Structures are given as C-alpha cells and as structure tokens.
Image (tube, grey):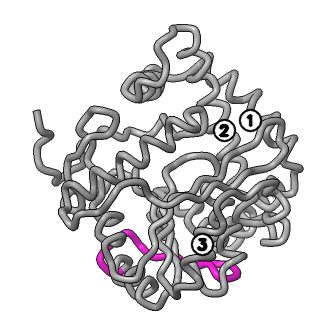
Amino acid sequence: MTLTMQKITFWFFGAIAAIPLPILHRIGNFLGSIGYCFLPKKLRDTISGNVDSAGIISDKLARHTLIKAVCQESIKGGFELPVAWMRSSEDIVDLFKAVHGWEHVQTALEKNEGLLLITPHIGSYDLAGRYISHHLPFPLTAMYRPPKQKWLDEVMNAGRVRDKGRTAPTNLQGVKQVMKALRAAEATIVLPDQVPHGADGIWVNFFGRPAYTMTLAGKLANMKNVSTLFFCGERLPNGQGFALHIEPMQGELTGNTVQDTQLINDNVEIWVKRFPAQYLFSYKRYKQPAGAPPRPE
C-alpha cells in the first residue's frame, strides 16, 4: 500500500469512528434491512442454513425476523470495527453500560493465573476485548488472522496493538506466543468458531452437524494455572452501548482432544442461543477447508 493510500484509509476509518454510536447503529439497521431484501442467494442460503441448524426458531415468521436482525446486527458490527480500532480506550470504556462477571477475572488475577478468554463471533468482540485489555494490569494477546485485503490489514493490526494489546498470527509461531503469555500469567483471546486450516482441527458437532473445529482452545484450557472464561460484548438496543458478559466455561475438561473440543463447541452453542441475532450466522461454519480429513458421515 502506498503512503497516500494508507493515509486515506486511516482517515476514512477515523471519520467513521467519530460518528456517534446511536447514528452508526441506525444506519446499520437501515442498511441491514435493505441488505435483507437483496441478499445474494448463496449468502441467504448460508444464513438460513446456519439458523436452521441451530434449531433456535421453529416459526416461519420468527425465522425471517431473526434473519433480518442478523443482517442488521452484522452491519452494525462492521461499523463498530473503526470505533474499536481508532477511538481511545477511555472512549471505549464509556460505551459499556454494564459489566457482568468481572469477579471471575479478579479471581484469576488474585491466583496469579493466566487468563484464557474465549469469545464466539457474537456482538462486538473487538470492543469487548479493548474494554478487558484496558482493565488488565498486563498485556492481552489476541490470535489474529490477517484479512485478505492488504489495505485493511494495516489499519486493523494498528488498532489492535494499541495500549496493552498484542496480536499473534494463527500459526505455530502465534501459538507459541500465546502459550508464553499464559505461562507468564497474562491474558489471551481466542475465537473458537473460526474454521481452522486443514491440519489444525478435527470434526466435532456444532448444533448437531459435523463442523471442522480448532483444537487450540481446548489445549490451551488444559494448561496448568490457566483460568478459562467465555465472554461476549452484547450490543444494546438503540445505540445505547454494550454490556460485557463474562462467565466460566461450563463442563469439565478431560484432556481428551475430541471431548474437550466438543466441550468448547457446546459452550459456544450456549452463548449463541442467548444472543442469536448477534451471532455471525453469515459465516460458513460447516465448510471443509483444503487439507482437512473427510467429513464424517
């Protein structure tokens, strides 16, 4: 990217970030409603298929209402990225109107344990991560898969490494970086519902269908002196702001890769059912990546 293009990109994202949140969310509702009416068939099929697999909605009208809401919330999430990357930590903290479960973080801090923070693609995970990072006494390392668009990569990475934020690539080097942080009693964020590269996952169920799933989250959760917490940055209605929810992982780890990976997916399902409209149902969660073993029958 040329220096001029880089400056334009940063200016553009800064301009979006300066727009008040209620206005951004109103625009998101408007564009999401339009998008719902003109969704490409492939994208509509992906969203509809994922919603149906989740088994959350049985009524036809309610199903259409949920899909429309998913479109609206997805657009809002896109507008929130410049806010997360460009605004100051103090401004972001002010956007959170309620925090539930911070005592679980405090307990881990008092025990001097590493913090494994797991969040599905629900709500505003970038903003929630910035809030958490601001309140921790040490760096927070987030696993980071660069976008295909090079112009977006630079502004995204710059936004995430501000203050105490660090990024780790989604490769062996990044895994070592995350493990080092946890052993040092620091914190890391992992999004467990990204389809991993071919050799980095296994097939386990997600809402009753085989989904190729990363084993990393379960393996990190099994590390000694690590506290595993799930969190979500819930988007409040009418641009009011956000609510942060933090809870311990439900269920017991066994040390068995298949069982622990399934346990992670089971927990993701719990959170999706709580905030279905804010889940990224447009993501092709059930795809088979190149190099993955055959999908089980």
Rendering quarter of residue 105: bottom right
Between the residue at mark 1 and the residue at mark 2, the CA separation in whole angstroms equals: 5 Å
Mark 3 secondary-structure assignment: helix
Q: Nearer the viewer, mark 3 or mark 1?
A: 3
Mark 2 secondary-structure assignment: helix
Q: Position of residue 104 (x, y in %)?
A: 58, 68
Per the rendering, the mark at residue 105 is: 3
Q: Residues within 10 Å of mark 2 (few under 14, many from 20)?
A: many
Q: Position of residue 199 (x, y in %)?
A: 19, 61
Q: Which residues are magenta?
A: 161-173
Look at label 3 and name its amino acid: Val
Q: Is residue 164 on the magenta stretch?
A: yes
Q: Is residue 240 above or below residue 202?
A: above
Q: Residues within 10 Å of mark 1 (few under 14, many from 20)?
A: many
Question: What residue does disc 1 label?
Answer: 28
Look at label 2 and name its amino acid: Ile
Identify which residue, 100 or 141, lies in the foreground.
100
